[in-house]
Amino acid sequence: MYHCFRLHRGDDLYDSIQRYADAHHIAAGVVLSAVGCVYRWELRDASGVDVQSGTEDVEIVSLMGTVSEHGSHLHASFARRDLSVFGGHLRPGCLVNTTAEIVLAELPDTVFTRERDEATGYEELAIRKIDRQF
């Protein structure tokens, strides 16, 4: 199943996608496409600690990740006016400028949850297949 929706000026990119997954009870999904722009961004780097943010008009050139009502994990890349690109772990605080067009694919018979992984110290993806024998 596919889900297509549009965000509007001022919508929070991360929070809006998570709320959509919650409202539509998406147990396991992926971002297929996301185009648009934000006027405020907030990203975390690979250290898991350092967060950077800024206020400038940037294009969404990439948004990918896993989506679930049990928790989502998204990464984004943005392009500045000079076409330089930067990215990282998407956090709440990325606010849509004019639009963001989102397409999600829901994975049948699959549930994504987040479970603490002692090796990484993070809530990591746990994948469960649902056997739907009738």
Image (tube, rainbow, N blue to C red):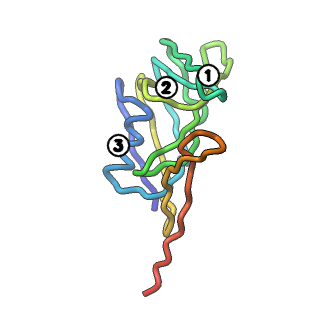
Q: Which residue is mark 3?
A: 19
Q: Which residue is mark 1?
A: 79
Residue name at image x 55 percent, y 20 percent: 51
Q: CA distance from mark 1 to mark 2?
A: 9 Å
Q: Residue furthest front?
A: 118
Determine the CA span between mark 3 and mark 1.
26 Å
Left or right, residue 83 beside residue 22 = right
In x, y percent, where is residue 60? 55, 29
Image position, residue 111 (x, y; %)? 48, 61
Residue 81 image-quadrant placement:
top right
Give the vertical position of 15 relative to 67 (above or below): above
Type of amino acid at the residue the image marks with label 3: Arg
Is 82 on the left-hand or right-hand side of 105?
right
Counting other residues with Cα less than 10 Å from the Cα at mark 3, is it few (<14), some (14-19), or many (20 or more)?
few
The quarter of the image holding the N terminus is: bottom left
Task: Assess disc 2: are there few (<14), some (14-19) or many (≥20) residues with their C-alpha within 10 Å of its C-alpha.
Answer: many
Q: Secondary structure at mark 3?
A: helix
